Structure formats: C-alpha cells, structure tokens
Amino acid sequence: MKVFLAGASGVLGQRLIPRLIQAGHAVGGMTRSPSKIELVAQLGAEPILCDVFDRDALIEALRDFQPDVIVNQLTDLPDDAAKIGEHAELNARIRTEGNQNLLDAGRKSGSPKYLAQSVAWQLPDGPDARAVAELERSVLAEGGVVLSYGQFYGPGTYNEDAVPAEPRVQIDRAAERTVEALDEPSGVVLIVD
C-alpha cells in the first residue's frame, strides 16, 4: 500500500517508516520542518514538506501522492516534558484543525483509509481533553481507526530512563502495533504493553 505518514519525523514516525517499508509499503513522510527532510529520506520515505495548517498545500500533497492509507501521527509537543502544559493549545489545535484538514484533504484525494493517534488515558479537563474527544469523534465518523496509545517509553521519548504508569507502551512496540493496525476495521485500537 501507499501510506501517507503525517508526523513522519516525530519519535513514533521515525520508527514507523522503516517498519512500513519492511512490510512492503511505499511511504510518503510528511514533515513541516525543512530541516527534517533529510532524516525522512534517510529513513526510506519519500519526503513531503507540508504544513497541516496549509489546506491547499495539503490537498495538493495528498493528490500528488495518492495514498491508500493516511496515518496521522501529528502532535505539537515540546522536547522538554516539563513544558507540555505550555503547548496545550498548540497540541489541541493540531488534533482538531490539523486532523480535520487531513480528513478533508483525504476526501479530496480519493478517501483513503484513515488512522489517527490518540491517547489511552484520561486527560484532565481542558483543551487537550476536548481536542482528543473531537479527534476521536471525527475519525470514527469518517469510518477511520483511532490508535489509542499508552504513554510512550524508551529511547527518544519523555520516559527514556523510567517506565511510566499504565497505560503505557514501549515505543518500538507501539510502532510494530501501528503497522499491524493498518488492517483494522473502523473503531478504536488500544496500543499498550
């Protein structure tokens, strides 16, 4: 299959690209960072430079790539876990407006199957919780698959040296389960240890 991976340069995206290719898929790796194009290419994906908030460019990118599947792994989180709260509005926007832009662009490029990242734990009431609920509702309404991940741990995650509380999932296991989830029917797929 042709897989359009939004968030290709993220901690999970970097692990997904080689696994998707090993499973026989062609991968278009979307990143909004020009500095990450080389990384995406080195991992084996066709780099696609596009900002999810640029609807016209996103529609064009999807039409050009013609994916069978869109995998939304977009987040807007800081490198420092202590600053997550400062990014709540940015992360909420990427989960709502960004996700909706991807869904809309998908409809305009042949309506490929759609999978999107969510979380397996209860978020405190606020922008993040409302954004996650909206993302899940819109993905399921579109007949897509919600990938409900536990807290990541392992190399490159916020939990490199410690195992977080449940629900949790080791980052490489999360990537393996995501590739397996490409064949899942519409619904919520729990990805935890």
Image (cartoon, helix red, strand yellow):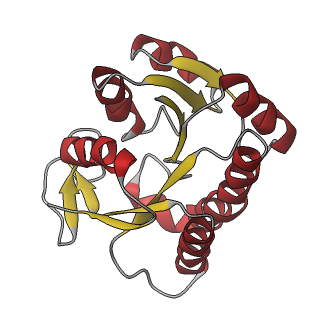
Residue 57 shows in this picture = yes
- Looking at the image, which residue is at 33% across and 50% down? 181
Q: Quadrant of residue 65?
A: top right
The C terminus lies in which quarter of the figure? bottom left
The outermost residue toward the bottom is 125
Seen from the viewer's position, the closer of residues 175 and 1 is: 1
- Looking at the image, which residue is at 41% across and 51% down? 80
- Looking at the image, which residue is at 54% across and 48% down? 113
The outermost residue toward the right is 56
Residue 154 shows in this picture = no
Q: How many marks?
A: 0
Q: Quadrant of residue 36?
A: top right
Seen from the viewer's position, the closer of residues 161 and 70 is: 70
Q: Position of residue 44 (x, y in %)?
A: 41, 14
Q: Position of residue 134 (x, y in %)?
A: 62, 75
Q: Position of residue 89 (x, y in %)?
A: 65, 67
- Left or right of 82 on screen, residue 114: right
- Left or right of 93 on screen, residue 26: left
Seen from the viewer's position, the closer of residues 186 and 30 is: 186
Seen from the viewer's position, the closer of residues 116 and 10 is: 116
Q: Position of residue 46 (x, y in %)?
A: 54, 16
- Left or right of 41 on screen, residue 14: left
- Looking at the image, which residue is at 65% across and 59% down? 90
> Looking at the picture, does residue 142 appear above or below residue 156?
below
